[in-house]
Amino acid sequence: MALTTYQSGKLALIGWNGQQMTLLLRTFQKPMGMAVQGQRLALATRHEVWQFANAPDLATHYLEHQPGRYDALYLPRVAHFTGDLNVHEVGYVGEDVWVVNTRFSCLSSLSADFSFVPRWKPPFISDLAPEDRCHLNGMAIAQNTPKFVTALGETNTAGGWRPHKATGGVVIDVTNNTVISRGLSMPHSPCWTGTELLVLNSGAGELWRIDPATGIHAIICVLPGFLRGLSCVGRTALIGLSQIREQHIFGGLPLQSRFPKLICGVALVNLDTGECFGTLEFTSQCQEIGDVAFIPDTTRPNILNTEKSAIQEAFTAPSLAYWLRPSSEIPEASPPNSFSELSFSALTTPALTTPALTTPALTTD
């Protein structure tokens, strides 16, 4: 799985090497929402929305002296320079990437011509302005279209959601343009599983199941953290948990009187029983999780940012993949004068299997 921690400026990939869990960290400026679709991964950062593509044939030879260490390698392919939209979540709508544009209180798609293209705004927002009027923050996609969103307030003034953040949260049906649930405590990360709507009632540490027709909810479980980031794998929910670093935004929440201590990490919850059967906890240097995403059919993922020189050596096309490295050169008395004097070989990846997600041990790449 992948998770972001905007406080530490890291995207973390959690893997399995056959014996224990592994942790690989990459630096990005304020990484927040993520989305995975097939071999693609989208990531929102402070000023950009990045799109990565997996090159599994290159992954296995990423480390020349440790072949087979990785089975996925996400390479940066597109960067949309949006400016600071305070994007919280992203999602694939067909081939397009949509973002939750928190600063302008709307859902937006990306563009080659503009910072963003507005696609939808809540019915109570009168016009688009960079004022974070309702703190729109989450988006659930159903049948290839945005279906539900969460916001911290039903408000239409600059920062108007702040005074009643503990009780003013709402869930909105995008297609019907109606509020289906009110009174939530800083809700985040709506998720449509295909049969049910799940929402994190973050300020109370609760995972909710909501009936979209009636708005009636049931509490599946209560966890010791401010909840943000939800990804479902079958009947298992991966939920991000955060501690509360400051009181200006997060003060006065029910969660603070409910638990004497909050944790930062990821909880694994059985959606049928509500049991939390596994937890990955960060005990230092990380207090907040931005988002959580499951990466299917992968045991040891890798991702490159623009700081890694390897992105200049990795070449992919629809029917080929090559590493163009100095080690590929054929020894000559004089330097080669064209690429025709370099030797390459096609790369293949063995069959992949997905192990269990829980283990007490952890190693760091």
Image (spheres, rainbow, N blue to C red):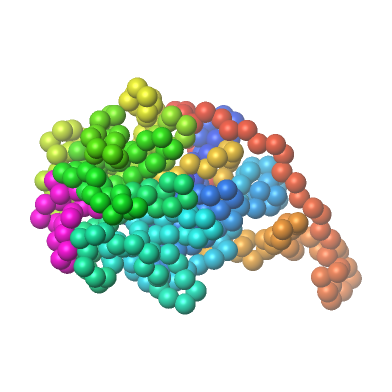
Q: In this rendering, would 315 be left or right of 83? A: right
Can residue 58 be seen by looking at this rendering?
yes
329 to the left or right of 69: right
43 or 211, nearer to the observer: 211
Residue 191's x, y, as percent? 37, 42
Can you say whether 263 is above or below 31 in the image? above
Q: Position of residue 250 (x, y in %)?
A: 18, 50
Kindly indicate the quadrant of the structure image that contains residue 262: top left
Residue 79 in the figure: left or right of residue 115: right
Can residue 178 be found in the magenta stretch?
Answer: no
In this image, 363 relative to 262: left or right?
right
Report the magenta residues as a range: 149-169
Q: Is residue 99 above or below residue 257?
A: below
Name the one closer to the observer, 155 or 277.
155
User: Going 24% across and 70% down the picture, which residue do you hit?
Assistant: 127
Residue 166 colored in magenta in the image: yes
Q: Is residue 167 above or below residue 127?
A: above
Q: Kindly identify the residue that appears in the image at 43 percent across and 52 percent down.
A: 145
Question: Where residue 186 sits: x, y (%)?
Answer: 21, 47
Question: How many numbered callouts?
Answer: 0
Residue at image point 57% right, 48% down: 38
Q: Main secondary structure of the magenta part?
A: loop
